[in-house]
Amino acid sequence: MTEEEILHKGEWLHDSLVLKINSKLFGKLLPIEVSFDQGEAKNLSTTSVSAINDFLRLTVENLQAIEEAIWKHCLACNQTQTSRGSSDGGKTWVDKSTTLEENLSEWGIKTKEDALDKSSIEGVWMANTWGKHSSANVFYLGISVAWDNEHGMNIIFRNGKLDDVE
């Protein structure tokens, strides 16, 4: 897509341009949000245009890497944990350990496929100003996950390749 096509199809919401794209790869309509600094001219940077096109060019191979990243995030968030608790108002304290399997079962997860079923791609986000600081095309793929409903997870793509997970 060109800058003109993106600006034409997008909708301005405060200091963000939101473009709704029907993603064949994810099988649903997804928002792509480009945030602008307050007062910044409403011109898309070349890195934002390139990042949007990088998202549109994601392939089945990228999807497999995304699925693997979701599974690894699930395992990392549900590792064996030890907590200290009291059932008698603080008179007696005991250490309680939970295993990975116990933690996963809290979310109904036993397999990678279960974890994928408990996650959902929510949209794409980028800051237009990133182009001022780097020549890399960067976008965040936002994902809601059952095991971390407060923060979810983001998969960061740089120049069309999965770069990091947070």
Image (cartoon, rainbow, N blue to C red):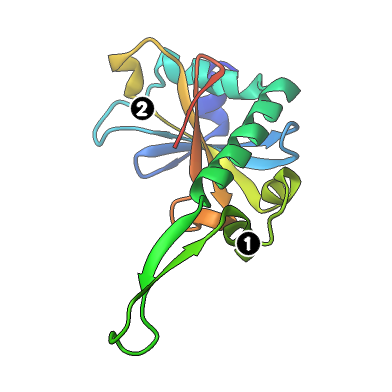
Horizontal and vertical percent position of residue 143: 56, 44
| Residue position marked by numbered label 1 in the rendering | 107
Residue at 63 percent of width and 40 percent of height: 71
Q: Is residue 56 left or right of 157 when viewed as pictured?
A: right
Task: Check the picture and name the quadrant holding the C terminus.
Answer: top left
In this rendering, the answer to whether 80 lies above or below 138 is: below
Mark 2 and mark 1: Cα distance apart in space: 43 Å
Residue 42 circle label: 2
Count of residue discs: 2
Q: Is residue 105 left or right of residue 148?
A: right
State the SS at label 2.
loop
- Type of residue at label 1? Trp
Task: Tell me the kind of residue under disc 2.
Answer: Lys
Q: Position of residue 33 (x, y in %)?
A: 47, 36
Classify the position of the N terminus by image quarter: top right
Residue 59 shows in the view: no
Specify few, some or many for label 2: CA neighbours under 10 Å numbering under 14, 14-19, or 20 or more: some
| 34 over 14 or under it: above or below | above
Residue name at image x 42 percent, y 60 percent: 82
